[in-house]
Amino acid sequence: MAPDGRLLDLRADGIPLGPPRHVRDLAAAIGEREAADHPRWVWPATFDLYPVLLRAGVRVARCHDLELTESLLLGHAGRWGAPRALAAARARLLGLPVPPDTPRLAAEPPGFAQAALFETTGAPPAAAGFDVLEAVQEVYADQHARIAGTEHPGRFRLLVAAESAGALVGAEMGHVGLPWRADLHDELLRELLGAPQPVGPPRRLAELTAEINEAFGLHGLHPDSPAEVVKAFARSGVTIPNTRQWVLKQVDHPAVRPLLEYKELYRIWTAHGWSWCDAWVRDGRFRPEYVPGGVVSGRWATRGGGALQVPKVVRRAVVADPGWRFVVADAGQLEPRMLAAVSGDQRFAAAGAAGDLYAALATDSFDGDRAKAKVALIGAMYGQTGGNAIPALAVLRKQYPKAFEFVEAAARTGEAGGLVRSWLGRTCPPAAAAWREAGLDPPEETGSGEAQGGASGRARGRFTRNFVIQATAAEWALTLLATLRTALTGMKAEMVLFVHDEVVVHCPADEADTVVAAVNECAATAGRLLFGETSVRFPLDVSVVGAYAEAK
């Protein structure tokens, strides 16, 4: 039986337009209202609610995700994350006992309040007299007022809209799924690893293990143990700090070649092997659980499945349906273009108008040396100050002073323990010391080099210097997603994958040209929405392919 519920009409500022209206089938009522008026739906958390609607065949065009918005507002107020406060807020909205010694927030985000709306999550019952709908309305009205008080309210509203739209896209992509051929996946695994074994690793990994042990003159070494490998090299007279690929490639030892191959194949076997396929691929579709805003910069994470890190060799299993194609669009040189757009450096922005920004910089200021121009720009954005970067940075500082000073100022703020913001207003987390003073463990750095928190001093400065650019790039990508989602309305085409700066659309072959035109137009629209009229271009590398691995 479909769950019943209540609907409440609100003004733009959150004031109710009348009393709540009871409906017998909440999903059906939302679908009917969506078709008639296309309102902006206000709800506690898209991740909890929207999959329920999608399974009922209901899609909505717009929403305001209270939980995501609350996180953005807390960050803007210098209370980034505030885990204890958020936990208490969730308890209050459920009408449950609040943990002791917890400060009260101006607005209490609704977190897990979905249980009270659909009664499907198994949450404990709310206290008598507690009204979830009333709490949602009060939080929304409070958030509306707090957004108006931010540093740049117009930009922050766009950030909230893009973040909420991204949550819709994430839920829809998880519902639709990425086409995945389990038979081809099995073939490529057997080709790389050999047949699966009832116990232990597949044949090729066992062979490489024996080869590595022989190269070290050992028995029983586990190549997947970095500590054992480091010790084995030390016994051979080779000192290495770790077993990362770039470190091993500098070592002259017979164990290096099989060890590098082992590491690559072991990663595929454990992260995207047969057990992964059994767990995540159903009915010819890979359906991960996306977490929009799961990284501090605003980039996405996943709750499993590794959708954001599918190795190129495994992409051979991602094949479009018969008569369909993938449109794969990847934003090139996105972070440098963000710097060109936000810094106000007109000379640098002129270079950003070119298709190849590095080449334009090289022609303008680096005697045509594209590699030197790239070293300078990456050094400025990531805080690289040694080696070949020193003379290149000197040129960048002289020729593009506003762009250089933009990231330098962000670095100085971070080194002093301050907070920096993206273009639309996403705020970086506090320094590690601030987390420890609050009795919390500071977040760690991610494998991609994107700092989740940061220590004091120069390391903190490197984090904040890149945050202002990387977080803005994430906002541009989110805005692209939101506008593309609208542009695809009425078509069979659907977004099926989003990885940082790349979006993949699955569409009938006869819609491919329309999708290509739409994604290019939406890239330009995203730039205008964020930065107004700017000379900086945001070009995409677009491929129309039958298999994901064929994309350039």
Image: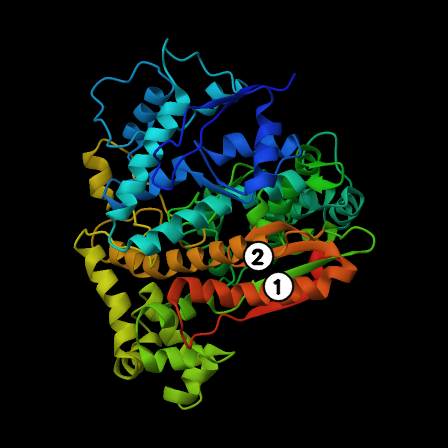
Gap between marks 2 and 1 measured at Cα: 7 Å
Which residue is tagged 2? Answer: 484
Observer able to see residue 35:
yes
Q: Name the secondary structure under disc 1.
A: helix
Which residue is tagged 1? Answer: 518
Q: Closest to the observer: 529 or 437? A: 529
- Disc 2 and disc 1 in contact, CB within 8 angstroms: yes
Residue that appears at 19% across and 52% down:
418
Q: Closest to the observer: 309 or 507? A: 507
Observer able to see residue 551:
no
Position of 487 relative to 534 (above/below): above
Query: Outermost residue toward the bottom?
Result: 367
Question: Quarter of the image holding residue 109?
Answer: top left
Query: Outermost residue toward the front?
Result: 18
> Residue 472: x and y, percent?
38, 59
Name the amino acid type tagged 2.
Answer: Leu
